[in-house]
Amino acid sequence: MASSTRQRADAARWHTASQVLAVVRRRPGITRAAMARELHLASGFATEITARMRQLRLLTEAPAPISGRGRPTTVLQPHHDGPVVLAVDLRQEDWRHAVATVDGMLHEAQRHTHRRRQPTAVLREIRHAVDRARARYGERLRAVSLAVAATLHDQHLVQASTLGWGPVDLSSITGDAIVPLLVGNDATLAGVAEARTGAATTAGTALHLIVEVGIGGTLTIDGQPVLGAHGAAGEYGHLPFGDRRLRCPCGARGCWDLDVDGRALARHLGEPAPADPRSYARHVLHRTANDPRARQAVSTVAQSLAAGIAGLANIHDPDLITLGGLGPAIRNTASAAFDAAYTDGLMTFHRAQSPPVVDAAHGDQGPLHGAALLGLDHCTSETALAEWAAHL
């Protein structure tokens, strides 16, 4: 009986510790008093749990700035010897990585251009970054979390059409099971970042879209992405919103991808298909200041982008739509064309109070922030915290 009571107490303790860390991620720099109010904890228990988390090298406390009357409190911060996650964002032309602490903040961010695009070469480079992180952080490194511009099925990469990859085994990135590898679609993870710590934190149902090479995204409900049966939901770029005469690298015809990025801009300008559609699109957007043809091309792409977003608003009925990647620049360059196409594409009853379309707060860093959150969700779960305590 005593053993069962002790087990229940331990389970409750890990549950509360996990909740505390989730609050710290949502609100970095939160005070202990504010955390206690948010989780409805008695002040004595809040003091006890934070003291335990100090002992477990999860959090430290620093005096909070004094403001007004009342008892002084402390700010909760990551412990300098606490667990970390290596977040990686793999894109068409480059890859980035950063170390995330338990408050979700990114440190030591680096960017690398692909020397070669063959899967073995790219994954080898990422493996070197993982090895360096393991050498520096040792057992503090609790997960490697990868955001990848690819279609995933049951956590396996089945196609990265923008990289020219078919099915690829990603397990070589970590090489063994000591440090778990977590994988998520880049647009999905960017949407998670916006819903939890970005521009959509007040939205119960949020739609996130990101324009890079093509367009992807996710629908989040209370900060959780709708992943589908096998984790492959959100492939919005492969909806048949585009020109049916065009064959997409994914194998389908008429994909929306082909009408909203640098490839579309090149077609409208009568220029060769770009090797790097993302960089090419940025170049065309820069040209619009003095080139009427470039402005017209961007306007046409903005209309296709807005019309598709309206269709998704009709489907999902979100509170808010966040737009990342190249999307804000396309919209802002041709705002009148975008707004008209968006309104025209909405069902009549939506127009009176249409879901606002706002720029993503995390910008180009959205997938990396999302990858960090995916890894931290894993390593601050109740089970993972118990394993961390046992390791100490």
Image (spheres, helix red, strand yellow):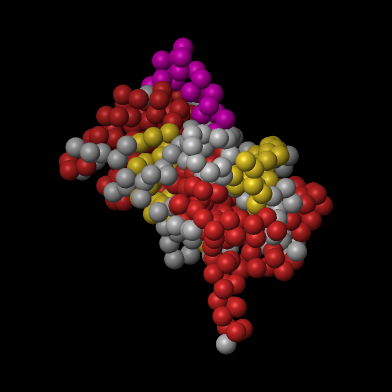
Instruction: Residue 183: tell me if it is visible.
Output: no
Q: Nearer the viewer, residue 379 or 124?
A: 379
Image location of residue 128, percent across then percent down: 78, 49
Instruction: Give the residue drawn at x 50%, y 18%.
Output: 287
Instruction: Give the residue drawn at x 59%, y 44%.
Output: 74
Image location of residue 54, percent across then percent down: 67, 55
Instruction: Residue 302: tell me if it is visible.
Output: yes
Q: Quadrant of residue 330?
A: top left
Instruction: Give the residue drawn at x 49%, y 44%.
Output: 197
Residue 17 on the magenta span: no
Is 374 drawn above or below residue 12 in the view shown?
Answer: above
Count of marks placed on residues: 0
Name the image quarter holding the N terminus: bottom right
Image location of residue 176, percent across then percent down: 74, 64
Is 230 drawn above or below residue 251 in the view shown?
Answer: below
Name the image quarter holding the C terminus: bottom right
Image location of residue 204, percent across then percent down: 36, 50
Residue 286 on the magenta span: yes
Instruction: Give the residue drawn at x 74%, y 56%.
Output: 140
Is 154 drawn above or below residue 349 in the view shown?
Answer: below
Which residue is most to the bottom?
1
Q: Nearer the viewer, residue 273 or 241?
A: 241
**Residue extent of the magenta highlight:** 278-297
Q: Quadrant of residue 63?
A: top right
Q: Nearer the viewer, residue 183 or 242?
A: 183
Which residue is most to the left?
348
Magenta span: helix, strand or loop, mainly?
Answer: helix
**Left or right for 131, reference 183:** right
